[in-house]
Amino acid sequence: MNPGISSDLTHGIRDNFAQFAHQVVQVFFVGLTLGMMRTVVPALSETEFGVPRGSFLLLTSFVVAFGVVKGSLNFVAGRLSERLGRKRVLFWGWLTAVPIPVMIYFAPSWGWIVAATVLLGVNQGFTWSMTQTSKLDLARGDQRGFAIGVNEFSGYVGVAVAGIITAYLAEHLGARAGLLWFGLASVGAAGLATLLWVEETLPWARLEAKQHATSTGPKARYPKNVSAQPSTWEMFTLMSWRDKRLAAISQAGLVEKFVDAWMWVIFPVWLFQRGVPLTEIGWLVGAYGITWGVSQFFTGRLSDRIGRLKPIVLGMWLCGGGVAVMPLLDSTTGLALAATLSGFGMALLYPTLSAAVADIAHPDWRGSAIGIYRFWRDFGYAVGALVLGVAAAVSGSLEITFWLVGGAMFVSGLLVALFSEETLPRLNPADD
């Protein structure tokens, strides 16, 4: 489709259901690609990939690499998508994922796993950003929370499903062979689906920008003093500190990734050291991911009705609280319930943070705004993994990381409550 504006385009999920559904399938594949690295790789880092026991910084190195690369590529993807289109950037993301399962299969050392994770960061930065941005292009303004909720629901269900499936494949085929065949199948199917069925959605974004001037409904509280075509630096400073609402949202995005980094690298290792079987680890990590994924189907819509601010703050506190109580629990059932609590808290905050950015980002530069928010958010993988690795190395124990994550989430939620505001135009419209 030519990225001009066609007269027959309309906004709304129902009116664009077929294309919206294709994007939902795409982000499920994105989640599968990420999820294949979430259970087997960290749990077997010592026995399969040669990471010495207790080398916490080396263990977290692949998550640090992932966070730096994915965060940066989110930024790049947002800018590129406004110039070249969403579909092209999405397909580039799938091309970069092709070598990942092959590198894991032949990896002679942990360094190969880190290198594969760098490519995973490129893949995730391009693909996940584009599936989210494309859904926002297609949806109406009053459907943004739901659109992002569905996007994250599908993606993180994919993460959880992949973690469970690859755990079983590792038991029956071996870790390397299981990840090889699962990865090649997922990436190949996703790339083919992109070429055959995904359409370019940039024309919908341009139509929304054109219609904005004549809109009669509640107006968004867009940041003031922003250029008609803002530069990259102008957008970066706006999102990072010049607008206190967007800055508060960006820091919350960064800190909430401490939880995900912890769930990725610390939780499976902590469980494995306690003698929990690999398949059971897959289900415990999956309890967090599945709750997070499924709940977003409802929490995104909830934020369209009650607003963004309260779900963000409450979600930050519930998510951190679930991690903080885990060292006090002895049973598998208790750990599963705590993981579920963290997953539900994440479901409250995660799509709502992105929806809040979309509320107050003008359609002309929304792709860049979301890209920069996602830069800060996914840079949290790197910051979180590094902080957690240092804390564990200095203390010689993994338990300190539970308290560190819980405390960071509480403080970050408090900052959102103090410095942000309700962004939903219906509840807090701009002054005429």
Image: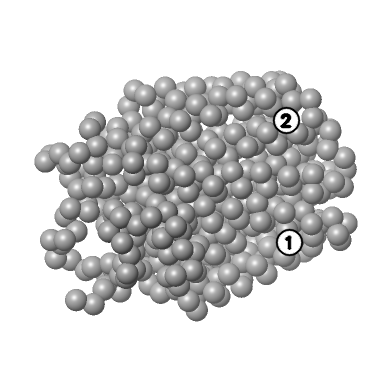
Amino acid at dot 1: Phe
Indicate the amino acid at tag 2.
Trp
For residue 116, which quarter of the picture? top right
| Residue at image coords 65%, 51% | 382
Instruction: Please report the residue visible at 32 percent of the width from the left and 70 percent of the height from the top.
Output: 224
Total tally of numbered discs in the picture:
2
Q: Is residue 187 left or right of residue 64?
A: left
Instruction: Say whether disc 1 or disc 2 marks the residue closer to the N-terminus.
Output: 2
Q: Which mark is residue 402?
A: 1
The reply to whether callout 1 and callout 2 are in contact (CB within 8 Å) is no
Residues packed near mark 2 inside 10 Å, few (<14), some (14 to 19) or many (20 plus): some
Can residue 177 be seen here? The reply is yes
Q: Residues within 10 Å of mark 1 (few under 14, many from 20)?
A: many
Label 2 sits on residue: 112
Helix, strand or loop at label 2? It is helix
Quadrant that contains the N terminus: top left
Front residue of 355/202: it is 202
Q: Where residue 397 appears, x then y in whole percent?
A: 85, 57
> Is the C terminus in the top left, top right, bottom left or bottom right quadrant?
bottom left
**Front position in the image: 373 or 328:** 373
